[in-house]
């Protein structure tokens, strides 16, 4: 039965966790969807495997028993938002992991332009700034159904998003203000904003180059 204080592990681990191709794929998924750790990938993989297993079991049923089970499985996937239109049972076997990652609340908040990035979307959710169907949700991995997608909005006061151009402009102004406070000459703020030369030449190197030029 297990200890009721601790949740039971609901996902499996790959047979070759240190496979180079697997590590590269997981790294790309974490970067694209702003995932915190690999456990979030494992959970979606477990859901995907369960749906594929159900599809295989339905395909193995006799024709007279398959229709009801097939409709039930396909309707559940359409309601989840994973599949659209009029899919066939064979389409379930070709579902990808990205199809389920796209239904996470964190991803949808980003796709709906309620946040500038997946990481910012995760921050908004965990801080209680996002609601689904009028209820505040603080779990980034919350699975959003097709009907709930249209109800996702800010909880309380809307957040003000800053464009990348405005963010860079504010950083330059802040660096300029700090330079004035320290009494540094004008132009120092551009260096603080990251506009340094790529390969600055030291005075010793410049003097050596001048002597070599005179020697010619």
Image (cartoon, helix red, strand yellow):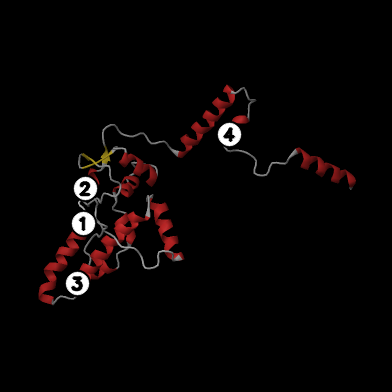
Closer to the camera in the image, 6 or 202? 6
Whether residue 202 is situated above or below residue 39 in the rendered picture:
above
Secondary element type, mark 3 = helix
* x 29%, y 48%: residue: 105
- Tell me, for residue 2, which label it has, or none: 1
* Residue 62 spot, x, y in % from top left: 13, 77
Sequence-first disc among 2 and 1: 1
Q: Quadrant of residue 1?
A: bottom left
Q: Of marks 2 and 3, which one's residue comes earlier in the chain?
A: 3
Closest to the observer, 132 or 138: 138
Q: Residue at x 56, y 35 (%)?
A: 193
Residue that carries the numbered disc 3 in the rendered image: 57
Q: In this view, does 159 lie above or below 108?
A: above
| Residue 90 percent location from the top left of the image | 25, 71
Q: From the viewer's perspective, is residue 55 above or below residue 108?
A: below
Return the mark for residue 148.
Answer: 2
Q: Position of residue 45 (x, y in %)?
A: 31, 61
Tag on residue 192? 4
Q: Would residue 196 be found to the left or right of residue 201 on screen?
A: left
Neighbour class for label 4 at 10 Å: few (<14), some, many (≥20)? some
Q: Residue at 89% of width from left, 46% of height from top?
A: 215
Mark 3, Cα crowd under 10 Å, few <14 / some 14-19 / many 20+, is: few
**Measured Cα–Cα span from mark 3 to mark 1:** 29 Å
Question: How packed is label 2: few (under 14 Cα within 10 Å), some, or many (20 or more)?
Answer: some
* Mark 4 / mark 3, whichever is N-terminal: 3
Q: Distance between the residues labelled 4 and 3?
A: 62 Å
């Amino acid at each position: 039965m297990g200890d009721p204080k601790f949740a039971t592990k609901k996902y499996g681990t790959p047979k070759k966790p240190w496979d180079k191709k697997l590590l590269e794929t997981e790294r790309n998924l974490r970067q694209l969807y702003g995932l915190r750790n690999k456990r979030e990938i494992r959970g979606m993989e477990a859901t995907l495997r369960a749906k594929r297993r159900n599809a295989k079991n339905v395909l193995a049923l006799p024709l007279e028993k398959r229709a009801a089970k097939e409709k039930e499985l396909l309707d559940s996937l359409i309601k989840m938002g994973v599949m659209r239109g009029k899919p066939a049972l064979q389409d379930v076997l070709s579902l990808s992991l990205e199809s389920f990652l796209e239904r996470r609340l964190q991803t949808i908040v980003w796709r709906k332009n309620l946040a500038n990035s997946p990481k910012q979307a995760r921050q908004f959710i965990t801080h209680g700034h996002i609601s689904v169907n009028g209820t505040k949700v603080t779990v980034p991995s919350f699975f959003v159904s097709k009907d709930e997608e249209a109800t996702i909005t800010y909880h309380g006061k809307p957040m003000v998003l800053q464009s990348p151009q405005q963010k860079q402009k504010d950083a330059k102004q802040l660096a300029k203000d700090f330079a004035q406070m320290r009494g540094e000459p004008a132009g120092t703020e551009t260096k603080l904003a990251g506009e340094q030369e790529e390969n600055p030449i030291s005075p010793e190197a410049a003097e050596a180059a001048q002597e070599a030029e005179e020697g010619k």
